[in-house]
Structure formats: C-alpha cells, structure tokens
Amino acid sequence: MTHKAVAKLRDWLFEPVPKGRIAAFRTLVYVFVALDVVFFSAWIKSHGDLPGNLYQPLVVGEVLPLPTPTPLVVGTIYWALIPLSLAAATGRAHRLLGWSVFVLYLEYMIVAMSYGKIDHDRFGLLVALAVLPAAGRARHGDKELTEAGGWALRLTQIGVVCTYFLSSLAKLRFGGLEWLTGATLTRAFIRRGTVLAHWLLGIPGFTTASQIGIVGFELLSPLVFVVKPKVRAAVVAGFYAFHLVTFCLITISFVPHQVAMACFLPLEKVTPVRWTRRLLRRPEPDGSAEQAREEVTEATGDVHQGAADGLDHLGR
C-alpha cells in the first residue's frame, strides 16, 4: 500500500467522534450486559448443572486453560457480571471495569456456546466490549472529538458488518446455491413461524425470493461504509427493520447485535444524565415568582404615574 492509501485508511479507522457518543454507547452496552445476563440469556446459568462430559469448548476454550463449567464457576461469573457491568456503565474506571466485564462476558459466552449450538448475534457486542476500555474517558453530552473513541466505534461497526457478510459466506459455503432455492425459510416458517409467517407461506415463491434477498443483503452490507451519511442512516434503519421483520416472522431475536449496531447512531444527542439533572434542579412552582412579577408591575406603574405628574406640573 502507498503512503497515501495508508494515511486514508488511518483517517478512516480513527475518524474522530464526539465523546458524548462514546459515553452514551458505553452506558447502553454495559447496561445491556447486565440485562442480558439476568433476562435474555438466563438459560446460560443452567449450563453449570450439566455433566462435564457434555462440554465441548470452542477453539478459544481449548487454547486457553479455561475451567469446565460447574455451578461454582458459572455462578461466580453470573453474580460478578451484574454489578461490574452496571458500575462500568457509569464510565468510571473505564479500563479496569471494562476489561473485567469483557473477560467475564467472553467466558460466559464460551460456556453458552460450547454445548452444540453457536449463535452469531454476539460477535459485534463482544467487539464493542473489547475496544470500549481503550476509548478513553467520556461524559454524556460532551462535544469534544476523540480519535480513540472513533477507533473503538469503527471496529465495532466492522464487527457488526462482518456478522452479516460472514453469515452469507457461511450459507453459501455449507448450503451452496441450494440455500437460495431450497426450503430453508419454509422449514423455519413451519417449525417456529408466527401467524404472519404461515400466511406468507401461501404466496408462491415468497420464501425463495426472501432467501435470495437475505443473502444479497448480507453480501452487500459492507457498502454501508462507502455511501453518503444520509444514505448510511437509511441503510442502518434497514438493518433494524430486517431484524424486526425476522422477529415478527420466526421470533428470532438479535437484540445483542442490535445493541452493538447502535455504534452507527448519533448517540451524543441522547443525554439522560443531563436530562435527569435538569429535572432534579427544576424549581417547584409556587406563588413567589408571580408575586415578584406583580411587585415589579406595581413599581413600574408608580414610576410612569410620577413622570406624568411631573410633566403636568411643568405644563402649568
């Protein structure tokens, strides 16, 4: 690569963003981790009760000396993640708390995905957790630009887009062109489809056209990086709409992925801390202000009346 190309790549990777965007994204991600552990992924905790011989760790679990899940191991991660992630959401001690949450959540996902089923909706979120500790200090509403924060968001964006692009490659690699023309969605609609999905099954060629559209959409997802800002906003809205339709048809939720996808949004405009402070500082309505206005009005009237009397006296 030429020096000019390297400079352009660096400018793209480290494109500055407002610190307020980092603060808002950080709060969103870490609050979601706590909610995910307690609500969305509560089923992971039960893996500690499974027999050890069922544990087939992912490659990272084989490379690292990670323990076999037990009630003690899984319970420790569970109860540590909740307070640590909520503390990290405040932005305090962002490196120490951020790295702690990333390591624990990564291990929690290894426990979750080492029993035969691997979800790909956590990749972008894990990238976000890995880079946020290096994003630097940030406060809600802060308009100062930061390259470190821009780098963190850019890598998260790449992780989000890779989730789509690599998913399409996996479909074509393992399913071949038959994935496009086969009965993939038909089977999904029959097995776990909603009323809307069952109705759509009656439309000839709908599932085949949808499968072609899904793969095409995933293969073209990297274009979000090269389109104009207004078009990019529309593309990101399309990403969210895609997952909404998916949930309405087959009730598959990609909430972790959608949380990570918020890295594309101008979150610096969302300032809950400032809103709360303004609400708490707002004075209670009482009669003192009204009384003060009445006193000012009376005093002004007296001045005008005095001036009129003086002019009348001079006229005489």
Image: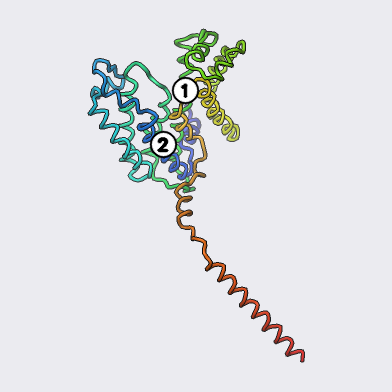
- Going from the N terminus, do you reach mark 2 or mark 1 first? 2
Mark 2 to mark 1 CA distance (whole Å): 20 Å
Looking at the rendered structure, which numbered label has been put on residue 95? Answer: none
Amino acid type of the residue that numbered disc 2 sits on in the rendered structure: Val
Residue sitting at 33 percent across and 31 percent down?
105
- Give the answer, above or below, for where 139 lies relative to 172: below
Q: Nearer the viewer, residue 107 or 96?
A: 107
Labels 2 & 1 near each other (Cβ < 8 A): no
Rendering coords of residue 300 (x, y %): 63, 76
Q: Nearer the viewer, residue 72 or 133?
A: 72
Residue sitting at 59 percent across and 16 percent down?
200
Q: Nearer the viewer, residue 102 or 43?
A: 43
- Give the answer, above or below, for where 266 lies relative to 247: below
Amino acid type of the residue that numbered disc 1 sits on in the rendered structure: Ile
Rendering coords of residue 45 (x, y %): 30, 27
Q: How would you rate the neighbour count of disc 2 (Cα within 10 Å): few for under 14, some for 14-19, many for 20 or more?
A: many
- Give the answer, above or below, for where 259 lies relative to 311: above
82 to the left or right of 295: left
181 to the left or right of 50: right
Q: How would you rate the neighbour count of disc 1 (Cα within 10 Å): few for under 14, some for 14-19, many for 20 or more?
A: some
Which residue bears the numbered disc 1? 252
Picture colour scheme: rainbow
Q: Nearer the viewer, residue 150 or 86?
A: 86
- What is the quadrant of residue 35 in the picture? top left
Q: Secondary structure at mark 1?
A: loop
| Quadrant containing the C terminus in the rendered view | bottom right
Q: Secondary structure at mark 2?
A: helix
Residue sitting at 56 percent across and 71 percent down?
292
Looking at the rendered structure, which numbered label has been put on residue 29? Answer: 2
Rendering coords of residue 76 (x, y %): 25, 32
Rendering coords of residue 83 (x, y %): 31, 40
